[in-house]
Image (cartoon, rainbow, N blue to C red):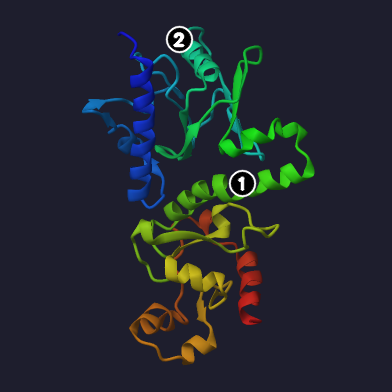
Amino acid sequence: MALRSSAEEAAIRQDVFRWLDARYSENGGYELSRKLLESYRFNGEPIKLLDTGRGIRNPASFSSTLTIMTSAGRRNPYEDSENADGWVTYHYQSSKGGDNVKLARAVENRDPIVYFKGVRPGFFVPFYPVVISHNDPIARVVRFPLDQGLSFLGDPLHYSEEQRRYADGIVRTRLHQPIFRAQVLHAYASSCTVCELKHSELLDAAHIAPDADSEGVAHVSNGLAMCKIHHAAYDRSLMGITPDYEVRIDQELLDEIDGPMLRHGLQDMHGKRIVLPSSRAAYPDRDRLAKRFEMFASR
């Protein structure tokens, strides 16, 4: 197959980013399925965004790599990894030839690609546009930051304290949160744990231990799927959840008279037991709930 012109290839990359923006928005910033990603078309022409059995997608008509991905739920034969600094190390394919040549060419040309991070089998969170920063042909790896703002800080091994604090903030807020959200919403079957609203675009992954806290890890056991109103109430200590998984509403709100939204949205939730995930491994951590409830009770 003949290679596309550089202008057409660049146009397709930009269209992929636009298409992902639209799908991510429609899906409420939630994970994207392999089936959905296989539906991409450019001017009616189907173009695969993921390969089958390989972590790299090099369309025959492209001069360089279009996407790479790391799967979840199975052993990664290339030991690709994301470190605490928000940088990904991605290994060359084991065979010599086209795949690795096109990956190296993407580095040389600074062609923007998509990195699909697997959050569970068959589901991904996309990061884009990603420009690969380093190519080590001896170690046979490439490295890149998931947030392109990190590339301007240089090598993470040589960060100053100020640079590290900045990088930590980016990793927490921009990188871990999409994955955290996808995992929490999946655990709660895309349903608010308090009111059982089932529209993912109206749901958040609320932290039990706040994000800035030392215990505020981006792990499903530190998360609760909540609709916007219950998330806001929880964050502002107008609503608490006991370590026995019961909802408590602030007494002043219980005493207030202000129409059906307050009554049905908050007051009627007082004393209700939250809906827990089907997997016990995803249950909210009782110790974190207890500490957070103390904050609510002492308000």
Query: What distance separates the C-alpha of mark 1 from that of mark 2?
Result: 34 Å
Quadrant of res 265: bottom left
Judging depth in this view, the residue of 1 and 220 nearest the camera is 1
Mark 1 is on which residue type?
Ile
Residue 271, percent from left and from top? 47, 81
| Residue 195 visible to an observer of this rendering | yes
Instruction: Work out which quarter of the rendered image holds the C terminus and state it.
Output: bottom right
- Which residue carries the number 1 mark? 170
Residue on which the image places disc 2: 98
Residue count near mark 1 (Cα–Cα under 10 Å), binned few <14, some 14–19, many ≥20: some
Mark 2: few, some, or many residues within 10 Å (few <14, many ≥20)?
A: some
Q: Which mark is residue 156?
A: none
Is 290 drawn above or below residue 80 in the view shown? below
The residue at 32%/49% (across/down) is 26
* Residue displayed at 38% across by 61% down: 202
Q: Quadrant of the N terminus?
A: top left
Q: Quadrant of residue 45?
A: top left
Residue type highlighted by circle 2: Gly
Q: Earlier in the sequence, mark 1 or mark 2?
A: 2
**Is residue 245 in view from this perspective?**
no
